[in-house]
Amino acid sequence: MHLSSPTPFPASRPRRLRRDTFTRNLVREHAVTVNDLIYPVFVLDGANRREAVGSMPGVERLSLDLLLPVAEDCVKLGIPVMALFPVIDASLKTPDGKEALNPDGLVPRVVRALKKEFPDLGVMTDVALDPFTSHGQDGLLDDTGYILNDATVEVLVGQALTQADAGVDIVAPSDMMDGRIGAIRDALEAHGHVHTRIMAYSAKYASAFYGPFRDAVGSAANLGKSNKKVYQMDPGNSDEALREVAMDIAEGADMVMVKPGMPYLDIVRRVKDEFRVPTFAYQVSGEYAMLKAAAQNGWLDHDAVMLESLLAFKRAGADGVLTYFARDAARLLQKQ
């Protein structure tokens, strides 16, 4: 039988397989499990600091002492990985983002503490300069304001090594500079970090869905009216994503990512079909904020749309999802 010529009605009645719960469960093609979830968190310096992110209901910036109980909750829920995004004090931001290389900076200190307290919890770190630069861009600027590629890659290599030295499990370059995966992989190997995994933000689009995230890490004000279109991908391009992914795999990426998520499920599907490598999607801040706002207004069933959106990623071919819903979803999945 071919799909173009299925068995005709009434010999075939597809509704037979939808009749009851046990049959639907039996023939379900895709499912979300807690092992599919990566939980992004925002960490800031100091102690006993908790700041709500206004554009992301339920999300907070936390100091390390308050982040540790969150990590413990992730362990209890079975969430395999927590992804760190730093909120850097404005006094430490410079045009060259040099604080990203500080071995005693916020990110390395948080990584060391997390791996000491929860050695079995995977920790992932962002490799990009935008939280550290006074201009809010992911790289170094020339005299005209253009983002320099090769000079930026040199700094990113140092940032990745700093994080690896602190004991991080996965470095995740999100900058979209050309050649950075190969340079980081070579440096990790040369410094003995042969087990450090690279999850490459391979197809990261210049999307309008990142707004709440930039509020959360404090880069929105620094970026101002500038944009990131000279290094992040054009939302109109699909074939280009495959070229980017192919390059990152060839350069040594262990896993690849598509960002944003739901508006780019077609890209997830194409990447998975083409390369058959571990493929992830980021359900970004704007996606999260939209679902939260609609649920708060009573327009959508929060839990139902949350789980349905995560299932969409799996159906599209994603092996896992970075999502701010991770803990809520894990709790619901435990009850199923």
Image (cartoon, helix red, strand yellow):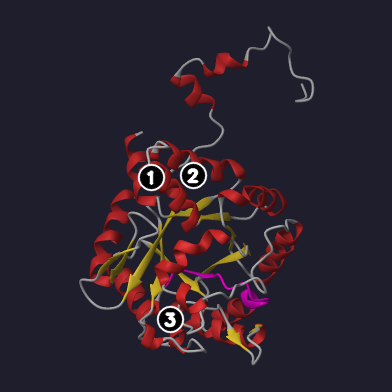
Find residue 165 and name its label.
Answer: 3
Q: Which residue is mark 2?
A: 310
Residue 278 vs 336, above or below: the answer is below
Q: Quadrant of the N terminus?
A: top right
Residue at far top of view = 10
Q: CA distance from mark 1 to mark 2?
A: 9 Å
Q: CA distance from mark 3 to mark 1?
A: 32 Å
Left or right relative to 193: residue 258: right
Nearest the camera: 170 or 50?
50
Q: Amino acid at mark 1?
A: Ala
Q: Amino acid at mark 3?
A: Asp
Q: Amino acid at mark 2?
A: Leu
The location of residue 63, given as percent across then percent down, is: 27, 71
Find out whether the residues at labels 3 and 1 contact each other: C-beta distance under 8 Å.
no
The crowding category of the residue bearing disc 1, from other C-alpha atoms within 10 Å (few below 14, some 14 to 19, many at least 20), is: many
Q: Earlier in the sequence, mark 1 or mark 2?
A: 2
Q: Earlier in the sequence, mark 3 or mark 2?
A: 3
SS under mark 2: helix
Q: Residue at x 64, y 92 (%)?
A: 143
Q: CA distance from mark 3 to mark 2?
A: 33 Å
SS under mark 1: helix
The crowding category of the residue bearing disc 3, from other C-alpha atoms within 10 Å (few below 14, some 14 to 19, many at least 20), is: some
Q: Quadrant of the C terminus?
A: top left
Whether residue 202 is visible, yes or no, is yes
Residue 329 vs 46, above or below: the answer is above
Find out whether the residues at labels 1 and 2 contact each other: C-beta distance under 8 Å.
yes
Residue 263 vs 250, above or below: the answer is above
The crowding category of the residue bearing disc 2, from other C-alpha atoms within 10 Å (few below 14, some 14 to 19, many at least 20), is: many
Q: In the image, which residues are magenta? A: 168-182
Nearest the camera: 92 or 267?
92
Left or right relative to 93: residue 77: left
Q: Which residue is mark 1?
A: 329
